[in-house]
């Protein structure tokens, strides 16, 4: 049995793994765009045979779909989770969402930007982006609803908050982290109509690793 396992592990090593191939596809995508995600260049990047790819993906379309699924899981899921996270006040809830977009928060801005660029080349991807945006907005509207905001106001505040974050990404804003953190209390007040308390800011800073 042990010998059989050893042989199986060696075979897997020669072929790579689904995760290894997907990571290479993601790296190529982020570096050079979707046209760079092709089977032979990925095989060359990994030092594996082209035929190894087919152990894990049926064809190129399958790995492209896996990239989209990975983007959804990485960015949309984490943003929805942040919107649904426990908070005693709307200002604390807003800080939960803002934290996701900061370094180490889990939302991958480069990946979001790359997928939005890809959407200009594919109606299918554009539809996926539209669905993701609506899913994220619904989560944020629901967050404002939870704290008693009227429906129309909840919608506009959610849109304001979300579109500012996506604007940072789409415009590839280069902003010093210290300056961005300094602006966050005023952003929260703009988004929610209320200023965060110092204790909420202290907890937020601890969560994002700022002392």
Image (cartoon, helix red, strand yellow):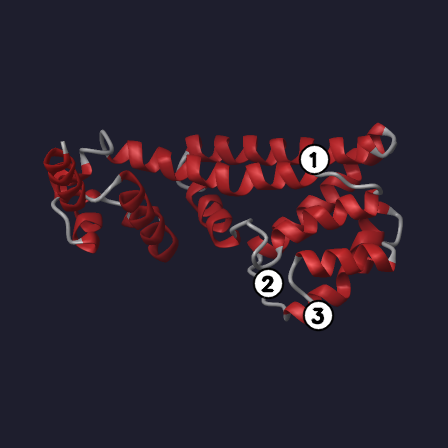
Location of residue 96 in the rendering, given as x and y in whole percent from the top left corner: 71, 47
Q: Residues within 10 Å of mark 3 (few under 14, many from 20)?
A: few
**Label 2 – label 1 distance at C-alpha:** 27 Å
Relative vertical location of residue 132 with respect to residue 194 in this rendering, above or below = above
159 vs 118, left or right, is right
Q: Secondary structure at mark 2?
A: loop
The earlier-in-sequence mark between 3 and 1 is 1
Which quarter of the picture shows residue 132? top right
Q: Residues within 10 Å of mark 1 (few under 14, many from 20)?
A: some
Q: In front here: 113 or 83?
A: 83
124 vs 11, left or right, is right
Location of residue 28 in the rendering, given as x and y in whole percent from the top left corner: 31, 53
Q: In front here: 68 or 47?
A: 47
103 vs 89, left or right, is left
The residue labelled by disc 1 is: 84
The earlier-in-sequence mark between 2 and 1 is 1
| Number of the label disc, if any, that sits on residue 165 | none
Q: How many marks?
A: 3
Which quarter of the picture shows residue 77? top right
The residue labelled by disc 3 is: 179
Relative vertical location of residue 7 with respect to residue 28 in this rendering, above or below = above
Q: In front here: 121 or 50?
A: 50
Residue visible at 17% across and 41% down? 9
Which quarter of the picture shows residue 54? top left
Relative vertical location of residue 103 with respect to residue 161 in this rendering, above or below = below
Q: Secondary structure at mark 3?
A: helix
Q: In front here: 171 or 18?
A: 18
Location of residue 7 in the rendering, given as x and y in whole percent from the top left corner: 11, 38
| Number of the label disc, if any, that sits on residue 173 | 2
Residue visible at 17% across and 45% down? 13
């Amino acid at each position: 049995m042990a010998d059989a396992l050893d042989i199986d592990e060696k075979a897997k090593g020669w072929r790579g793994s689904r995760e290894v191939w997907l990571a290479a596809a993601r790296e190529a995508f982020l570096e050079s765009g979707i046209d760079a995600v092709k089977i032979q260049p990925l095989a060359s990047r990994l030092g594996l045979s082209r035929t190894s790819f087919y152990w894990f993906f049926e064809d190129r379309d399958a790995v492209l779909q896996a990239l989209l699924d990975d983007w959804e899981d990485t960015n949309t899921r984490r943003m929805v989770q942040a919107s649904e996270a426990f908070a005693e006040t709307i200002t604390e809830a807003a800080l939960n969402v803002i934290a996701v977009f900061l370094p180490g928060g889990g939302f991958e801005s480069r990946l979001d930007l790359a997928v939005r660029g890809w959407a200009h080349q594919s109606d299918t991807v554009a539809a996926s982006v539209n669905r993701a945006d609506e899913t994220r907005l619904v989560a944020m509207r629901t967050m404002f609803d939870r704290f008693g905001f009227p429906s129309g106001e909840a919608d506009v505040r959610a849109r304001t908050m979300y579109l500012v974050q996506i604007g940072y990404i789409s415009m590839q804003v280069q902003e010093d982290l210290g300056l961005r953190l300094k602006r966050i209390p005023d952003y929260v007040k703009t988004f929610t109509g209320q200023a965060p308390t110092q204790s909420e800011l202290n907890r937020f800073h601890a969560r994002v690793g700022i002392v």
